[in-house]
Amino acid sequence: MSSAPTVEIAVPKTGRKITVPTGLFINNQFVPSVDSTETIECINPATEDVIASVVAGSAADIDRAVAAARAAFTTTWGKHATGWERARLLHRLADLVERDAQELAELETLNNGKPVRIARDFDIGDSVACLRYYAGWADKIAGQSLEVDNQTKIAFTRHDPIGVCGQIIPWNYPINMWSWKVAPALAVGCTIVMKPSELTPLTALKLSELIVEAGFPPGVVNTVPSLGAVGGAALSAHLDVDKVAFTGSTVTGRKIMEAAAKSNLKKVSLELGGKSPHIVFESADLEQAANWACLGILYNTGQDCTAGSRLFVQESIYDKFMAALISKAKALVVADGFDEKASGGPVVSKVQYDKIFKYISLGKEQGATILTGGEKRQGKGFFVDPTIFANVTPEMKIFQDEIFGPVLSVTKFKTEEEAVALANNTTYGLGAGLHSNDANQCMRVANELEAGTVWVNQYNILYNNVPFGGKKQSGIGRELGSYALDEYTSVKAVQWNFGEKLDFPF
Ligand SMILES: NC(=O)C1=CN([C@@H]2O[C@H](COP(=O)(O)OP(=O)(O)OC[C@H]3O[C@@H](n4cnc5c(N)ncnc54)[C@H](O)[C@@H]3O)[C@@H](O)[C@H]2O)C=CC1
Ligand code: BAL
């Protein structure tokens, strides 16, 4: 590994000093850009201070990273590393991420804002588990044996690694989205060019050091920090990239799919936005439902693709439920992520902060009733307090648009049919939740909701062995579980004749 370039970041609250590479990571080396002198400033959203500047990779840098990934695919990885070896290295990587969890969490908090405790115990804890889950799959990738003719022929399938993968990840869960992308791709034998979000590139660079330490051959994982319109666009349009996996906005997902269609028809998986409904029926345990509703919209300060941002509450329990909901939402401590009492941090950027307050203003203008929050704080940092709107109707922008902040829209309903119709009144289809103690109702409504995941009497809980993804304009393809392996493999049918003679002309 080359020694340059790096920056030493002093973590203000803990005194820890973290050395972070600031160059491109290609062929297991940190290197400068081929032709870019641009840099990306990384901001601490709690203080608005610049914490580091990293290279802003160019399209030529993407070319170089793709060439490294292709070379590794055809020599040391791909079909050249056994499943057992891929598993061994993934387990080793998981051990290293676990070893460095506290340092990685502090770096994540500095760059993203989320509480250190949550970054360490949830984002990183889940990431370690994700790496181990896919390590378990690495030597179990299997095709089928198919009977086509009992006497003279057989067919079988191979699930080949698809090749070089561009992976474009967002800023809301930088480490977690990194592991959701990297783990299944490496398990099946793909090589990777990772483009982290320009808002949060630091932990992807730090994790790149662990790729070397774990022992992955050069070129298997490459990291190119870059602006989306530069590096992300170059990856999506690249003629030698076989697949792009993306998490982010629907607008950008559309651009990626268009670029794939106009270049080499690379395989694309998209995990996009949402406006997920969360329904509370009258038979529900109201205290529990209020807890889950708060988690649904306030976890990660609402910067979550499955945020339960539209809450539907049955008329008969509305007042009682709302009283519980509001008092719980007010109790959430939103503070600097290094504050031990914080359950929520600032939102990631000024752009995101302004977007959220634009929607809060729109909600007020369009006639929704604000029940708590919605006011700006004095001082530094992109802090947004939990904000709840009541009397929200489907024509309002806050009902339809993804806000990606701690802003909940509440709508009252009378009947189950009305609740389902309201819930499905969206172009998105990522998550949905319902609370009811009537099992038949749970099953009926779960069947009707148009979403990739439906949570019953809980919300926003994910497991590495359960698939995750969207319907409608929330995405294409699935992450997690065995389903994610399909996104990174290409099925080859081998048809074998061991006896049939062909007469010619036929
Ligand atoms: N589904 C999710 O988890 C996420 C949804 N969002 C939504 O998107 C909104 C805007 O946030 P952004 O950071 O602007 O999201 P974005 O979708 O533009 O960014 C996500 C990733 O896509 C890359 N990207 C941007 N333009 C690209 C292009 N033309 N080609 C290829 N890659 C490109 C970015 O560099 C980043 O790595 C948020 O307010 C939120 O509503 C944002 C992040 C994650
Ligand atoms: N919470 C799962 C992934 C995402 O929000 O992007």
Image (cartoon, grey):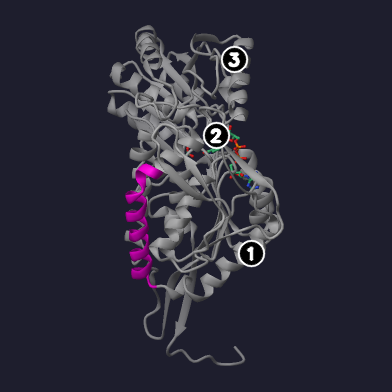
Residue type, mark 1 in image: Arg
CA gap, disc 2 to disc 1?
36 Å
Q: Is residue 39 above or below residue 305?
A: below
Q: Secondary structure at mark 3?
A: helix
Quadrant housing residue 473? top right
Disc 2 to disc 1: CB gap under 8 Å:
no
Question: Magenta-highlighted stretch: main secondary structure?
Answer: helix
Of residue 191 and residue 399, the one placed in the foreground of this image is: 191
Estimate the spatial distance between the alpha carbons at disc 1 and disc 3, rounded to whole Å. 47 Å
Q: Whole-percent x and y of residue 313?
A: 41, 16
Membership of 275 in magenta stretch: no
Q: Between label 2 and label 3, give the one nearer the viewer.
A: 3
> What range of the chain is rendered magenta?
82-103
Question: What residue is pinned by disc 2?
Answer: 428
Can residue 342 be seen from the camera position used here? yes
Q: Which mark is residue 46?
A: none
Q: Is residue 36 found left or right of 377 in the rendered image?
A: right
Q: Would you place residue 131 above or below residue 428 in this image?
A: below
Dividing the image into four equal quarters, which quarter contains ligand 1?
Answer: top right
Residue indicated by mark 3? 363
The residue singled out by tag 1 in the image is 64
Instruction: Relative to 106, say whether 418 is above or below.
Output: above
Label 2's element? strand
Horizontally, residue 58 falls left or right of residue 333, namely right
Question: Can the viewer see residue 430?
Answer: no
